[in-house]
């Protein structure tokens, strides 16, 4: 009997994440490290304890096995997330009607009408810094989802610059014993630190929300294909 497909720790996390979304669950899963990995049956048993349907786990596992799910890409500035990206390989090319259904999902998920564009075989939906592109691959199509926090770079640059300037002025005033200069430098330092703190507090929260939304869109794309194929059987 052939060995059953086993999933490594990264694949385990991705499968449970997507299965949880499909089942409309919002639980976090902490799995104990296991050297040989986990089988599909073991994954289904673990997921069942959180109320996740075995079929949803099997579907997510199939997507991971074919490379259809990739981890979220995160770009950071000064240690905080400022941009996210995700690529989803689709099981087959989408029809125009299926793409329209995904656009509906995008509008509902982000509560924005956005702008739809088409150029040759490319399809795109965008709204501000949110961008979703449907593009061809040698073996089919993929969805590229990306977003960035537009003001994050400015706040980080100005905050870091102000903090550095304030610290330099304060250090110079302290060493020279100029109390008046020191008092003038402290507000500059404070403003810089406040701007950096603002990013440190707001951006992780923004990234968590956007990450969940992008994952939901990725899951919806697979669901659209599955439902369309089921209706033709």
Image (cartoon, rainbow, N blue to C red):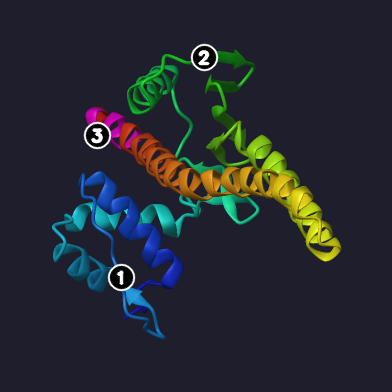
Vertical side of 42 occupied by 163: above or below: above
Q: What element does badge 2 sit on? A: strand
Image quadrant occupied by the C terminus: top left
Q: Disc 1 or disc 2, which is closer to the eye? A: 1
Give the residue drawn at x 52%, y 50%. Answer: 200
- The residue indicated by pointer 1 is 30
The secondary element bearing badge 1 is classed as: loop
The nearer-to-camera label among 3 and 2 is: 2
In terms of sequence position, does the residue under pointer 1 or pointer 3 come before the other?
Answer: 1
Where residue 211 sits, quadrant-wise, is top left
Residue in the image at 16% along x and 61% along y: 50
Q: Position of residue 220 (x, y in %)?
A: 34, 35
**Mark 3 and mark 2 residues within 8 Å of each other at the beta carbon:** no
Predominant secondary structure in magenta? Answer: helix
Q: Is residue 76 left or right of residue 41?
A: right
What residue is pinned by disc 2?
Answer: 116
Q: Quarter of the image for the N terminus: give it.
A: bottom left
The tag on residue 230 is 3
Q: Position of residue 55 (x, y in %)?
A: 20, 53
Can you name the residue that lies furthest to the bottom here? 35
User: Which residue sits at x=38%, y=23%?
Assistant: 98
For disc 2, the neighbor class at 10 Å (few under 14, some 14 to 19, many from 20) is some
């Amino acid at each position: 009997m052939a060995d059953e497909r086993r999933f490594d720790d990264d694949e385990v996390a991705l499968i449970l994440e997507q299965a949880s979304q499909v089942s409309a669950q919002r639980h976090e899963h902490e799995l104990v490290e296991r050297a040989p990995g986990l089988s599909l049956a073991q994954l289904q048993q673990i997921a069942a304890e959180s109320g996740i349907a075995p079929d949803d786990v099997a579907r997510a596992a199939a997507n991971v096995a074919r490379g259809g799910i990739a981890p979220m890409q995160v770009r950071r500035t000064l240690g905080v997330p400022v941009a996210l990206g995700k690529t989803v390989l689709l099981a087959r090319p989408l029809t125009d009607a299926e793409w329209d259904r995904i656009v509906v999902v995008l509008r509902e998920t982000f509560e924005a009408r956005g702008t739809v564009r088409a150029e040759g075989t490319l399809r795109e939906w965008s709204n501000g810094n949110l961008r979703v592109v449907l593009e061809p691959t040698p073996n089919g199509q993929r969805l590229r989802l990306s977003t960035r926090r537009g003001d994050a770079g400015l706040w980080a640059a100005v905050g870091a610059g102000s903090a550095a300037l304030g610290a330099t002025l304060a250090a110079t005033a302290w060493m020279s014993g100029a109390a008046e200069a020191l008092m003038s430098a402290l507000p500059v330092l404070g403003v810089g630190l406040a701007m950096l703190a603002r990013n440190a507090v707001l951006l992780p929260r923004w990234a968590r929300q956007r990450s969940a939304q992008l994952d939901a869109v990725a899951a919806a794309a697979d669901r659209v294909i599955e439902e369309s194929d089921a209706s033709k059987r």
